Amino acid sequence: MRLILALLVLAGCNAAKPDPSQAACTEAQTCDTEPVDSGHDSQPTQDSTSDATPTDSAPLDTGHTGEPCPSASVNAAFVGGTLMRLYPTPDGAGATFSLAGELLTSTRADGSTRWTASPGVGALLGGFDVDADGWTDAAVVTSTPLGTTCGSTAMSATGLTFVSGADGALISGVAPLDDLCWDFGGVQYPTSQWTVDGVLFGAAPGVIALSPYYASNSWFFTWSGAFSSEYLYYPSTATYDSAYTADQLNQWGTGTSYLANSHIANGLLLETGGELRWVFFTSGRVVHYAVEAYSDAQLRLDVPFLSNARTDIAGRNYGIVARDPGDPNLLVLVTGTDGASLLADARAGAAVTDPWGGIERHVTVHNLVSGTVEDRFFSYAHDNADGDQYVNRTAYPAAPFVRTAGASALAFSVFDGTTWSIHVTAPGTTTDAAIYSGWYLWDIRDIDTDGVDEWVVSPTAGYLPMWQTQLWHEGGEPVATFDGLPALIAGFRAPETTTTAGYLYPALTVEGACGPALVLINSDGAYVLGE
């Protein structure tokens, strides 16, 4: 068994100089607050498994439980009657991952077990290739009770264990960090430090970034038969200002570059400027770090920005980040909620899932070369005494790009308080080129492998979608109509697409009688195939 223990612990909340060897603050505390809006939001509950049948869904006996060599467009399989995300493998047999208790199981598309492992009880994540062997690897966020409380909530220590996708061997463990306990005017609650969105990666195998939920340091881990690590200073403490030469003053007029308690990193490891960089959005800025040992030049670029110039809010960037497939110089952020929340609401018959929907709703295009940021503001959920929860609420599809010959157009959905509409921008910008009123966009992908992307959409009646799914070609041309809604289950993030939710929810296809078939779910909770 390959086991390498990587010990990572954080500095205190207000430490003058963060040091990876110092312990994290675990007592109730009042940290430096952000202007007006504290920026502290309840953490989402982490899924114990990233591949699961939607609650109360009836299994589908399709007679097609997966082929030994699934076609390129197939991204799911029914394994023992359970719908599972399917990932490509070097041997062509595909892989699924499921976590039940402490048992992690990987199966092939045909349902046979590839391996089992016991990394611990927790939440499953993956999509990266940490050991550079060509296989999709997984990790588990483990949680151990501390026996203490923050307010009325039990505290835990969270850690990470990485598992080889090839054979289930344990690759590495990351030392647990205690929850942080916050106290805002007597309101106390904890936040976990290691979460499913604390592992960031890109297309380059053998390198990842690790960043706790509220970080003062983050780390690059590079694999060469074993992990080696380098640290960086996160833009959340005063050390950030003194550690780097490229830091820029934040947009709140505090006279500092850093912003205390900056939010979780939302970004990718990608090649740009002739080197590998970690580019991510955090509170009120986008930053570029070179993947290299610390120096004052490690921070390559710091671009502070505020959506709609709002200094009364926290600069949240919760949503999907993806690199434009048509113009790799563009990195796109679409904040808001994902399709899984609307599907859950449709099944519940009411708007009850993810009520705050990203809180700050905006769309951003960042040019990796010029450093420019174009941002378009839609809404802030707490405006009008929380009255804007469902006003100009944005929702991102699993893939937000309409591909063109050059820079892609962006596509996403907006609920104006009465009606959902699909917004499509001009290529490479945030400016609308077309709006399709009364429709919701779940995903854009080439489902039938003919080289032309299909838009997976549904008509809506008020906030909830109707129980119908259409496939469109660009321009709103319908090519197929099915009863039911796309069956969405949580899946790993992708090398060029990440989310702060920690998972992606693409439209799913399995091997059908005549090629790839779209998996749908009807109002009774039964799966059906759209062929």
Image (tube, rainbow, N blue to C red):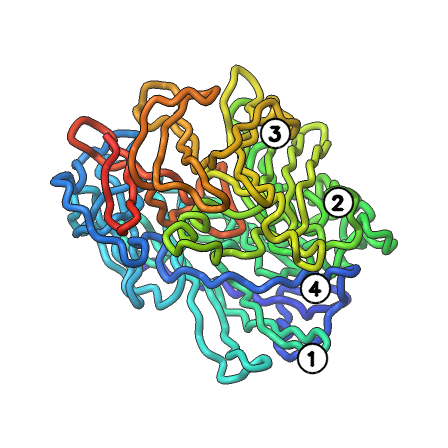
Q: Nearer the viewer, residue 20 or 256?
A: 256
Q: Nearer the viewer, residue 522 or 295?
A: 522
**Count of numbered circles in the view:** 4
The x, y position of residue 391, in whole percent, is 62, 47
Q: Dot 2: few (<14), some (14–19), or many (≥20) neighbours within 10 Å? A: some
Q: Dot 3: few (<14), some (14–19), or many (≥20) neighbours within 10 Å? A: many
The amino acid marked with disc number 2 is: Leu
Q: Dot 1: few (<14), some (14–19), or many (≥20) neighbours within 10 Å? A: few
Are the two marked residues, 3 and 4, in contact with CB atoms closer than 8 angstroms? no
Circle 4 is placed at which residue position? 18
Q: Quadrant of residue 458?
A: top left
Instruction: Say what secondary structure mark 1 lies in.
Output: loop
Q: Marks 4 and 1, how far apart in space? A: 27 Å
| In this rendering, the label closer to the viewer, 2 or 4 | 2
Which sits earlier in the primary sequence, circle 2 or circle 4? 4
Circle 2 is placed at which residue position? 306
Which sits earlier in the primary sequence, circle 2 or circle 3? 2
| In this rendering, the label closer to the viewer, 3 or 4 | 3
Q: Marks 3 and 4, how far apart in space? A: 32 Å
The residue sitting at 30% across, 48% down in the picture is 523
Q: Marks 2 and 3, how far apart in space? A: 19 Å
Name the quadrant of the N terminus. bottom left
The answer, for residue 327, to whether it is visible in the render is: no
The amino acid marked with disc number 4 is: Pro
The amino acid marked with disc number 1 is: Gly
